[in-house]
Image: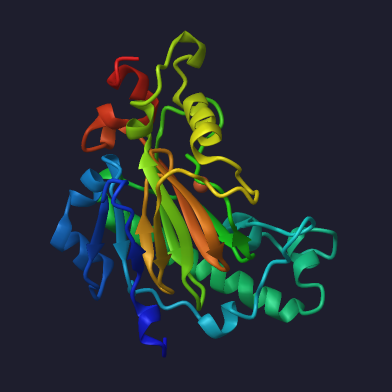
């Protein structure tokens, strides 16, 4: 990157929100990151710290990737899974044929680069978290303009007992801007969770997102206190999106990883998200 301020993630901290950020100096390999910090990665993640690594050692073909943009708007695409991108190019109405109908050659190059970089990202995750014994994971390639989502806690279907690892990589030429607010335990302390809340923390997240974050996808900014973070191009961040409230303010191209982990492999299995009601005595 030519513009020096773009090389480094900027954080505008709100003193009313806990400072849970961990910033790591650049290393020349993911193995070096792990050599230096070891199981701290698991400890930080499981306890809801947000770990930021600028200029991670990944070499996407940016010239190629920045030629691709998913259409924005009602008929647009927010994301495509890496698996869907690697599916055979058909002449039917599949998403890749539709996206690259004017330039199938670019589409095929995009497919190959997505497949190559996806493998690198999954290897990086496995290297940073060896105790989780990762063998795969879901990647979503988000090459559409995203903006002004309210603060929210992520919700997955049902009451998934797995530990979900979330890692994000800004693959654009411009910062990805997020607001980041309180962690769920901090917010929950203000609520009298009676029986009507049930014991499903996914349902808690849904309710907290509605009451705490305000208008997701809308134009009513959240009134809750929040840090603002400009994640630099080429930066990676690791954030437990079920525990830490967050919302994109602006973004263009990002890869997000969601990886299921056996809770028994956690540094502290009691911290698995599905155990929150028991842990908090609710
Ligand atoms: Fe989210």
How far across and how far down the image is residue 162, in percent? 41, 32
- Residue drawn 58% across and 51% down? 149
The structure residue drawn at horizontal position 48% and vertical position 26%, both measured from the top left corner, is 204
Residue 140, by quadrant, is bottom right
Q: Residue furthest bottom?
A: 2
**Looking at the rendering, in which quadrant would you find the N terminus?**
bottom left
Q: On the rendered structure, is 35 left or right of 97?
A: left
* Residue positioned 58% across, 56% down in the render: 148
Q: Is residue 159 visible?
A: no
Q: Nearer the viewer, residue 203 or 193?
A: 193
The vertical placement of 162 against 126, above or below, is above
Q: How many marks?
A: 0
Residue 42, x across and y down, in percent: 24, 46
Toward the viewer: 212 or 243?
212
Residue at the outermost top position: 195
Query: According to the image, what is the colour scheme of the structure?
Result: rainbow
Q: Position of residue 213 (x, y in %)?
A: 51, 40
At x 41%, y 66%, the residue is: 231
Q: Is residue 174 visible?
A: yes
In the displayed orientation, state which residue is furthest to the right.
92
x, y percent for residue 126 = 33, 54
The quarter in which the C terminus is drawn is top left
Above or below for 51 versus 184: below
Please identify the quarter of the rendering in which residue 187 is found: top left
């Amino acid at each position: 990157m030519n513009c020096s301020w773009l090389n480094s993630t900027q954080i505008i901290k709100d003193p009313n929100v806990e400072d849970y950020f961990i910033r790591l100096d650049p290393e020349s390999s993911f193995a070096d990151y792990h050599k230096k910090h070891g199981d701290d990665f698991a400890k930080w993640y499981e306890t809801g710290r947000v770990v930021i690594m600028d200029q991670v050692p990944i070499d996407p073909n940016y010239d190629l990737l920045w030629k691709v943009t998913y259409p924005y708007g009602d008929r647009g695409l927010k994301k495509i899974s890496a698996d869907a991108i690697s599916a055979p190019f058909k002449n039917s109405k599949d998403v890749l044929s539709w996206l690259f109908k004017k330039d199938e050659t670019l589409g095929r190059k995009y497919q190959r680069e997505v497949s190559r970089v996806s493998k690198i990202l999954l290897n990086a995750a496995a290297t940073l978290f060896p105790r989780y014994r990762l063998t795969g994971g879901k990647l979503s390639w988000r090459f559409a303009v995203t903006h002004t989502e309210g603060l929210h806690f992520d919700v997955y279907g049902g009451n998934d007992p797995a530990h979900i690892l979330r890692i994000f990589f800004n693959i654009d030429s411009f910062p990805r801007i997020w607001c980041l607010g309180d962690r769920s335990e901090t917010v929950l302390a203000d609520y009298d969770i009676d029986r009507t809340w049930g014991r499903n923390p996914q349902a808690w997240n849904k309710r907290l997102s509605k009451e705490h974050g305000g208008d997701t996808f809308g134009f009513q900014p959240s009134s809750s206190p929040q840090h603002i973070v400009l994640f630099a191009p080429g930066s990676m961040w690791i954030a437990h999106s079920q525990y830490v409230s967050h919302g994109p303010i602006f973004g263009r191209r990002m890869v997000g990883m969601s990886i299921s982990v056996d809770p028994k492999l956690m540094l502290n299995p009691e911290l698995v998200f599905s155990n929150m009601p028991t842990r908090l005595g609710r």
